[in-house]
């Protein structure tokens, strides 16, 4: 059959525009105490150890051995990239794919429960080449 339907694709409305181009890179996702599913579009932030965590999550447990008490806890994680694929944060560090640049719909992004994206977060993302706009449905 020449007209056989092979599959379908659902558009998640995460990407707003093709400029700037959405490019990806590999990042290290910090281990968490219990396995947690993460969805594409989750905003990741760099913690004091240089690993990625969900923006707005409590990073006070990320204090490395040898650091003065409280140093990592007082250093907020800075918004850095956007998760490109669904994955699970596990009890060990993992390498995942994230968007380094792109133009995304603000209201389709995911952050930690109880946290809201701030103007400072948006500015930090803009600084690394990620633009945000509002998704408009017709």
Image: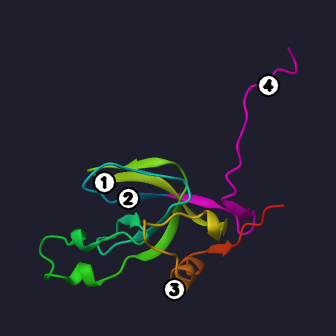
Tell me: residue 9, above or below residue 77.
Answer: above
Q: Earlier in the sequence, mark 4 or mark 2?
A: 4
Q: Residue furthest front?
A: 114
Quarter of the picture containing the N terminus is: top right
Where is residue 8? Give x, y as percent.
Answer: 73, 34
Q: Residues within 10 Å of mark 1 (few under 14, many from 20)?
A: some
Q: Position of residue 40 (x, y in %)?
A: 54, 54
| C-alpha gap between disc 4 and disc 2 | 38 Å
Residue 105 among magenta residues: no
Left or right position of 75 against 99: left
Q: What span is in magenta?
A: 1-25
Helix, strand or loop for disc 1: loop
Tell me the residue at 52%/63% (across/down). Answer: 110
Foreground label between 3 and 1:
3
Q: Earlier in the sequence, mark 3 or mark 1?
A: 1
Q: Which mark is residue 120?
A: 3
Q: Quadrant of residue 46?
A: bottom left
- CA–CA distance between discs 4 and 1? 39 Å
Q: How far apart are the two marked residues, 3 and 1, measured between alpha carbons?
A: 27 Å
Mark 4 and mark 3 lie on one chain; the one further toward the N terminus is 4
Residue at the disc numbered 4? 5
Quarter of the image where the C terminus is located: bottom right
In percent of the image, x 51 and y 52: which residue is there?
A: 39
Q: Is residue 90 left or right of residue 9?
A: left
């Amino acid at each position: 059959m020449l007209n056989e339907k092979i599959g379908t694709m659902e558009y998640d409305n995460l990407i707003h525009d093709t400029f700037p181009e959405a490019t990806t890179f590999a990042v290290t996702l910090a281990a968490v105490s219990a396995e947690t599913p993460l969805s594409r579009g989750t905003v990741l932030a760099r913690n004091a150890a240089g690993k990625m965590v969900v923006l707005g999550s409590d990073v006070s447990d990320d204090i490395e051995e040898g650091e003065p008490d409280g140093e990592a806890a007082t250093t907020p994680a800075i918004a850095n990239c956007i998760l490109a694929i669904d994955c699970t944060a596990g009890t060990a560090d993992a390498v995942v794919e994230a968007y380094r640049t792109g133009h995304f719909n603000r209201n389709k992004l995911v952050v930690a429960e109880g946290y809201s994206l701030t103007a400072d977060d948006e500015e930090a993302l803009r600084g690394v080449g990620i633009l945000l706009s509002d998704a408009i449905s017709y």
